[in-house]
Amino acid sequence: KAGVTQTPRYLIKTRGQQVTLSCSPISGHRSVSWYQQTPGQGLQFLFEYFSETQRNKGNFPGRFSGRQFSNSRSEMNVSTLELGDSALYLCASSWTSPGNEQFFGPGTRLTVL
Amino acid sequence: GIQVEQSPPDLILQEGANSTLRCNFSDSVNNLQWFHQNPWGQLINLFYIPSGTKQNGRLSATTVATERYSLLYISSSQTTDSGVYFCAVLLAQGSARQLTFGSGTQLTVLP
């Protein structure tokens, strides 16, 4: 069974631009969560989707948004990029709930110049 | 919110040595996972262990949920064990349905 995949793996953007990251969960998994990892803040939760609905959201500004499609694939979008958005963005999938074992993708490393 | 503390923050070992990493958490949980972050950033699942003891090769883990801690044991360490080890928990109650991560233990295994 294929693991969680994320595209693209690397991105370089400039301040003010917007970016869209994609995540395909493990086949059969319906819950998708997104996390941001930075050296200063560590791993922080962004949001979680299940059946195309956002069930939970972390403490991030509205510039961070996401969605989930009927095939459980998920995208996250960051608008009006800031230097501080430079981070590793990790996607995790689980069967139906974050309470189930979560499996992470390889991440997208975003650099904002 | 829930607090997750990992110790030690840094650990340097000679190849072949054993080690114990600790994770303390401040509230009841119904999900606890241990991960190893590889040099490319991917989190590799080690254990899903909300309670009890599990073993996988040279690695084993124990979670004592009533006392709110978990231990990860690495025996006969190898240089490939180097990296950051994270503990992550999910609260048993409340609306917060996300993993909360500790700050990690940076393990360096010297040849």
Image (cartoon, rainbow, N blue to C red):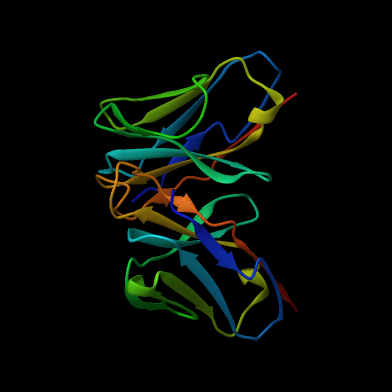
Residue at figure coordinates x 43%, y 26% from the top left: A75
Residue B16 lies in what quarter of the image?
Answer: bottom right
For residue A17, what is the image quadrant?
top right
Q: Which residue shows up at 42% across the image and 24% down it?
A: A66
Where residue B56 sits in the image (x, y, percent)?
Answer: 42, 76
Q: Where B58 sits versus A84, above or below?
A: below
- Give the percent coordinates (x, y) of residue A96: 24, 44
Which residue is at the front of the view, A56 or B41? A56
Q: Nearer the viewer, residue B65 or B72?
A: B65
Q: Is residue A72 above or below residue B85?
A: above
The image shows residue B107 at horizontal and vertical percentages of 66, 69
Residue A76: x %, y % from top left: 46, 26
Residue beneath the point at 69% across and 82% down: B15
Is B97 rendered above or below residue A17? below
Quarter of the image that includes the C terminus of chain A: top right
Q: How many marks?
A: 0
The reply, left or right, for residue A62 in relation to residue B68 is right
Left or right, A108 with reference to A31? right
